[in-house]
């Protein structure tokens, strides 16, 4: 069952009011959006998601939960959210981007996002995307593999893992999640490193997923759109209402660093109020019921 992360905290920070417009950049299965819609009772919910199946599910769920709320689907990446809202004549009072992925994506071995079960080395959040993890592993130079594992995975054994991948693909194609995970584990073992806290494949899988989906580039584009709107720069159609509350849930330090810098810059420039002077994390109770919430970090601002 999909459980939306930090749901109570999100509702408290966004403070939905009747008739407002809520923009969810990562609709997932619609858990956050349905809760916000119920709190509003009326208004509009705009849902974006790369995964067309999840988007359709989320829209149906929100509409069933909140029949008086207008539900708008905006297929594709949240970086295009300003244009989706403008297309429908809307300006958001609330924006949320939950940068995790839905349980349907993690639990489906055919998506290739998990190293705990065998599946094709895919990792695309949008099944129509042009690039798969298998293509990166098969064709990128060893130096580029090392770079993304180091920069996107923050793995101190990036050079060794990239070398092991290069050696392995010389013997035959690497096409499954278990093949790649075993290569990462063998690299750690050969270096005398027994990872005690997380699986040795974790950081490499994170790095490949980020590269396949250009996750940091798209997050930067969304944050730039928020910053530009707050400063009144006409780089996109008007899409944020005065006083808009913007909340982002990140799951690793690379994402959180970008969010912290963008939001901190708005606060320092007097363009926003910081709603989370202390970063918001999941409670012990939530972590117990939903282990995926353990690494979640929530930051939010209110634009002036």
Image (cartoon, rainbow, N blue to C red):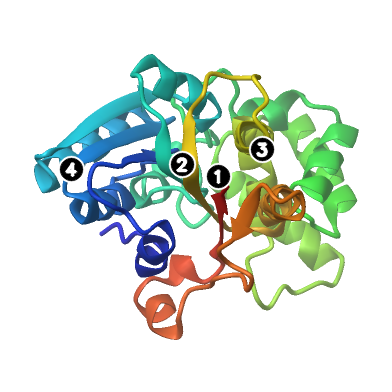
Percent from the top left, x then y, of residue 9? 41, 68
**Sequence-first disc among 3 and 4:** 4
Dot 2: within a 10 Å radius of its alpha carbon, few (fewer than 14), some, or many (20 or more) residues?
Answer: many
Which residue was labeled with disc 3? Answer: 227
Q: Which mark's residue is nearer the viewer, 3 or 2?
A: 3
- Where disc 3 sits, the SS reads helix
Labels 1 & 3 near each other (Cβ < 8 A): no
Q: Which mark is residue 119?
A: 2
- The CA distance from mark 1 to mark 3 is 38 Å
Residue 41 falls left or right of residue 184: left
Labels 3 & 4 near each other (Cβ < 8 A): no
Q: Nearer the viewer, residue 168 or 228?
A: 228
**Sequence-first disc among 4 and 2:** 4
- Where disc 4 sits, the SS reads loop
- The CA distance from mark 3 to mark 2 is 39 Å
Labels 1 & 2 near each other (Cβ < 8 A): yes
Q: Quadrant of residue 198?
A: bottom right
**Sequence-first disc among 3 and 2:** 2
Which residue was labeled with disc 4? Answer: 42
Dot 1: within a 10 Å radius of its alpha carbon, few (fewer than 14), some, or many (20 or more) residues?
Answer: many
Which residue was labeled with disc 1? Answer: 177
Residue at image x 61%, y 40%?
Answer: 209
Percent from the top left, x then y, of residue 1? 25, 59
Residue 243, relative to residue 290: is it above or below? above
Percent from the top left, x then y, of residue 184? 72, 54
Residue 88 falls left or right of residue 249: left
**Sequence-first disc among 1 and 3:** 1
């Amino acid at each position: 069952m999909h459980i939306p992360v930090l749901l109570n905290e999100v509702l408290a920070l966004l403070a939905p009011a009747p008739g407002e417009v809520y923009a969810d950049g990562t609709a997932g299965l619609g858990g956050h959006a349905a809760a916000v819609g119920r709190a509003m009772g009326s208004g509009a919910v705009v849902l974006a998601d790369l995964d067309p199946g999840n988007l359709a599910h989320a829209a149906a769920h929100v509409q069933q939960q909140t029949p008086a709320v207008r539900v708008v689907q905006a297929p594709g990446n949240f970086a295009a959210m300003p244009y989706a809202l403008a297309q429908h004549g809307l300006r958001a009072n609330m924006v949320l981007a939950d940068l995790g992925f839905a349980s349907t994506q993690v639990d489906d071995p055919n998506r290739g996002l998990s190293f705990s079960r065998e599946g094709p080395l895919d990792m695309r959040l949008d099944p129509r995307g042009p690039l798969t993890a298998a293509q990166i592993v098969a064709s990128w130079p060893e130096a580029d593999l090392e770079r993304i594992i180091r920069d996107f995975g923050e793995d101190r054994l990036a050079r060794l893992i990239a070398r092991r991948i290069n050696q392995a693909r010389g013997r035959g194609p690497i096409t499954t999640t278990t093949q790649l995970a075993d290569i990462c584990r063998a690299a750690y073992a050969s270096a005398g490193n027994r990872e005690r806290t997380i699986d040795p494949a974790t950081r490499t899988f994170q790095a490949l997923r980020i590269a396949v989906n250009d996750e940091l580039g798209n997050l930067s584009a969304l944050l730039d759109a928020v910053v530009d709107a707050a400063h009144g720069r006409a780089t996109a159609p008007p899409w944020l209402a005065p006083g808009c509350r913007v909340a982002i849930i990140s799951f690793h330090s690379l994402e959180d660093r970008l969010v912290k810098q963008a939001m901190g810059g708005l606060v320092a420039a007097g363009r926003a109020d910081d709603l989370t002077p202390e970063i918001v994390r999941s409670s012990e109770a939530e972590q117990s019921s939903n282990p995926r919430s353990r690494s979640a970090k929530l930051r939010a601002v209110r634009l002036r």
